[in-house]
Every structure is written in structure tokens, then in C-alpha cells.
Image (cartoon, rainbow, N blue to C red):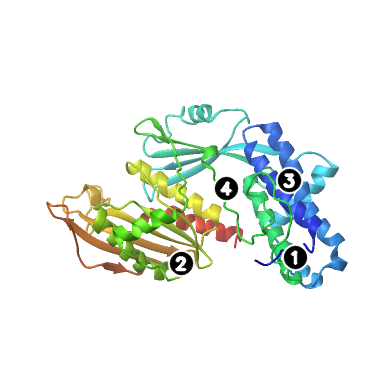
């Protein structure tokens, strides 16, 4: 094991770690207006202090003029970074930021029918009170799923929720310090770890998974037709070598060697077929990619159609939090070979058609616009045995008939592009 080198910028590095811990303290205080404001003020000042500490030590830093000049040139035009500088000056010299407590209401009726609105409410108003106020209007929809997201925003930056905004600034500063460490040849630093446990000396140039900007703790969901709430339950499963060995014995071995989601999809289809053949059912699986590597694997489960609508919007939230640039989803589904419409001219979903067929569906997509849809039709014998038909491949899926559920993710990628988030 290689010993950690002395940190080339220990004061700045410690301040960056301080900011990580402050971000989590601010997140934990989200429903407490005064505590949230206090932690926000500390965090914004802490973020600005990172660059002050780097500048203070510039004479001792290898290649400072190169990597710091690139940083300034890159971030100066960005409205978000200008906001961070102005906000620090305002907090120190004038007053608190002018915070607004918003509720973002997202109503989803189907894959193509969606509406989002933002409402301003008193900070201490509960989500149930917000819903009662919003739906007291008889003109509001009564079908589909509605989600309420609590949001703190600064009046000077209305398009960014504040956990999101400060996380983006943190990422840029992490990239700055990473460049300085790389120039000095320091891959790791022997600095003390903190609380929470995720606050370590490791400097990542990518979003940290612990900095969840779309936490379920700040969202509530309601099935409008059933009139009941939809709860999110997350179970974390850590890798267990014994279980991996048992899985190999049950299903056989396979390898996913491709780094591209599009190229990995056929390999993952083969793996999914092996599991379905053995178990007679297949749990949905989604792999998130960033920079050619898998950064997340999740088994999203739903129990009805409204739950499915909600699930794909929450997967879009996850893609945004992880800043994933590619996804592969494997799932059992209903499929029909042609397009049939009802009396109103609306497409009849395969699940409602008598000629429907079960398929194993593996779909892949990238932020760059690549798409691939693979369908493996199958039938079940009375004995339960699975028989597969030929795989149907549609590289473009131009009519979106199979990739319609991915629309929330495609929309989120577009929003990320518009904000310039790389």
C-alpha cells in the first residue's frame, strides 16, 4: 500500500470537507426554517473560503497559474457561480438571503400527460395542508399521481433549489482542488475523517451519491384515483461474496464487458434471460452509467400503473442526483406487435389487449441521444417452463412505443443540458 503524501493544500482541503459536513447539516434541517437558514449561511461562506485558502497558498502550489486560471475561466461565466460569490458578500456585509418556501407539484396522468407547477407557501405549512389548499380548486385533476416536493429557493436564484445549487458549487470546488492535488502528485491525503462517515479526504470530481438532491424525505405522493398516499421504501443490499457464489451456482456465469450502455444491453439481456429461465419471473433492474462505468444498480418495484408512472419519475430524480449519462433497464412487460386505437383515437396499451404477449424488455439510452430497445418474447408452458422467441431489436424506436416510460429521464437530461451540468 502506498503511503499518503502530505496534502499540498491542507487548509483548503479541510475547508472543503467542512463544506461537505455543512451540506448534510443543512439537508437535515430542511424542515426547520431557522436552522436551515443558519446552516445555509455557514455553507455559502465556507464554499467561498475554499478559494480564499487556495489563493492564500498560491506561491507554494505546483502549476497554480495553469489549473487555477483554467478554473476561473471556466466558472466565471456561470450564473450559479456568480450567485455563490454575490451571496457570500451579501450574507457577510448586508443581510440573509431572501428565501422562499416553495412546493413543486407534479401531476402525472400517463407517459405523455404531465404538468408541473410551483406554489409559494408559509415555511411551516405541512404537505397535507398544501395539498388541501391546492386541490380545493375543483378544476384540478382527479386522476393519476401527484407528487409534492418541498423546496427552499433564493429569490435571486429562483430556478435552483438550494441543496442543488450549493451541491453544484461544491462539485466545482472539488474539481479545483482535485486539479491542484493532481499537479502536486498527491493522490490521497492523510486528513482525519469526520461525521457523517461520508465526509472523507477523498476528492471526487463527480457528484457524491450521499448528496441526494431529490430525497424521498422531502417528497410526498398521492394516488388521485385511489385517494391514498404512496410510500417509498428503500432497502440497501451490500455485496455478499457468499451470495454471489450461490448465484453463480444457480444461474451460471456471465460477463458484462461493455462500458457503453448501448453495447452492454445485449449482454444484460442474456443475463436476464438466464434468470427468467431459472426463476420464472424477473425483478426489474436498472443500471446507471457515468463516464463508461456503472455507478448505481437498483431494482425498482411498483404494484400498479400509477406506481409505475411515479417510479419512472423517481428514477429520473435518481439520474439527476447521480448525474448519470446512461441507463439500462431490464423488466418484464406486455407487448403487442402493432398499434391499435380506441374510439377516441387513443392508443390501447398492450396490457389492455387480448393479443398481448409477455416479453423481457431491455432498454438502453444515453444522455447523448443513443437509444436501443430489445424485446425477447416468451411463453410459459403448463409446467412453468419458459420458451423464448427471437429477440426483436429496434435501435431507434422512433415512435417511442417501447421507450415511452423513459420520457421523464429524457426530459431530465434535457434540463441538465440547459443548466450546463456536465
Q: Is residue 397 left or right of residue 49?
A: left
Sooner in the amino-acid sequence: mark 2 or mark 4? 4
Disc assigned to residue 281: none
Choose between 201 and 313: the one closer to the eye. Answer: 201
Asked if residue 87 shows in the view, the reply is: no
Mark 3 or 1, closer to the camera: 1
Separation of marks 1 and 2 at Cα, in angstroms: 42 Å
Mark 3 or 2, closer to the camera: 3
Separation of marks 2 and 4 at Cα, in angstroms: 25 Å
Sooner in the amino-acid sequence: mark 1 or mark 2? 1
- Quadrant of the rendering where the N terminus is positioned: bottom right
Sooner in the amino-acid sequence: mark 4 or mark 3? 3
- Which element carries disc 4, helix, strand or loop? loop
Q: Is residue 393 left or right of residue 184?
A: left
On screen, 107 above or below 203? above
Q: Position of residue 305 (x, y in %)?
A: 33, 43
Separation of marks 3 and 1 at Cα, in angstroms: 28 Å
Q: Position of residue 145 (x, y in %)?
A: 40, 39
Residue, x 38% and y 34% (percent of image)?
A: 224
Q: Mark 4 — residue?
A: 212
Sooner in the amino-acid sequence: mark 4 or mark 1? 1
Q: Is residue 360 left or right of residue 213?
A: left
Residue projecting furthest to the left? 382
Q: Mark 3 — residue?
A: 43
Q: Mark 2 — residue?
A: 369
Q: Is residue 265 left or right of residue 80?
A: left
Disc assigned to residue 5: 1
Mark 1 or 2, closer to the camera: 1
- Quadrant of the rendering where the C terminus is positioned: bottom right
Asked if residue 321 shows in the view, the reply is: yes
- Which element carries disc 1, helix, strand or loop? loop
Amino acid at each position: 500500500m502506498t503511503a499518503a503524501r502530505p496534502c499540498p493544500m491542507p487548509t483548503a482541503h479541510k475547508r472543503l470537507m467542512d463544506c461537505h459536513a455543512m451540506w448534510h447539516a443543512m439537508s437535515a434541517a430542511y424542515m426547520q426554517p431557522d436552522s436551515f437558514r443558519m446552516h445555509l449561511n455557514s455553507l455559502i461562506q465556507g464554499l467561498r473560503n475554499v478559494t480564499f485558502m487556495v489563493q492564500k497558498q498560491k506561491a507554494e502550489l505546483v502549476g497554480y497559474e495553469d489549473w487555477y486560471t483554467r478554473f476561473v475561466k471556466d466558472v466565471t461565466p456561470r450564473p450559479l457561480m456568480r450567485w455563490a460569490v454575490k451571496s457570500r458578500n451579501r450574507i457577510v456585509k448586508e443581510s440573509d438571503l431572501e428565501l422562499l418556501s416553495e412546493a413543486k407539484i407534479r401531476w402525472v396522468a400517463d407517459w405523455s400527460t404531465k404538468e408541473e407547477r410551483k406554489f409559494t407557501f408559509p415555511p411551516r405549512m405541512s404537505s397535507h395542508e398544501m395539498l388541501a389548499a391546492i386541490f380545493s380548486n375543483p378544476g384540478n385533476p382527479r386522476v393519476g399521481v401527484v407528487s409534492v416536493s418541498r423546496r427552499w429557493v433564493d429569490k435571486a436564484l429562483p430556478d435552483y433549489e438550494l441543496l442543488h445549487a450549493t451541491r453544484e458549487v461544491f462539485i466545482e470546488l472539488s474539481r479545483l482542488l482535485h486539479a491542484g492535488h493532481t499537479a502536486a502528485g498527491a493522490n490521497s491525503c492523510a486528513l482525519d475523517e469526520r461525521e457523517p462517515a461520508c465526509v472523507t479526504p477523498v476528492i471526487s470530481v463527480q457528484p457524491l451519491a450521499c448528496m441526494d438532491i431529490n430525497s424521498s424525505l422531502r417528497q410526498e405522493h398521492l394516488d388521485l384515483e385511489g385517494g391514498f398516499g404512496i410510500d417509498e421504501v428503500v432497502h440497501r443490499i451490500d455485496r455478499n461474496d457468499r451470495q454471489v457464489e450461490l448465484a453463480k451456482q444457480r444461474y451460471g456465469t456471465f460477463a458484462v464487458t461493455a462500458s457503453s450502455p448501448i453495447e452492454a444491453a445485449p449482454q444484460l439481456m442474456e443475463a436476464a434471460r438466464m434468470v427468467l429461465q431459472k426463476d420464472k419471473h424477473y425483478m426489474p433492474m436498472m443500471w446507471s452509467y457515468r463516464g463508461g462505468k456503472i455507478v448505481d444498480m437498483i431494482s425498482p418495484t411498483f404494484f400498479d400503473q400509477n406506481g409505475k408512472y411515479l417510479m419512472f419519475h423517481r428514477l429520473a430524480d435518481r439520474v439527476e442526483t447521480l448525474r448519470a449519462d446512461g441507463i439500462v433497464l431490464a423488466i418484464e412487460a406486455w407487448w403487442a406487435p402493432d398499434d391499435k386505437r380506441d374510439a377516441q383515437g387513443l392508443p390501447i396499451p398492450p396490457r389492455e389487449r387480448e393479443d398481448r404477449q409477455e416479453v423481457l424488455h431491455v432498454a438502453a439510452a444515453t444522455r447523448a441521444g443513443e437509444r436501443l430497445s430489445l424485446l425477447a418474447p416468451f411463453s410459459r408452458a403448463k409446467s412453468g417452463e419458459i420458451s423464448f422467441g427471437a429477440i426483436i431489436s429496434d435501435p431507434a424506436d422512433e415512435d417511442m412505443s417501447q421507450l415511452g416510460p423513459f420520457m421523464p429521464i429524457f426530459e431530465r437530461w434535457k434540463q441538465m443540458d440547459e443548466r450546463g451540468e456536465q
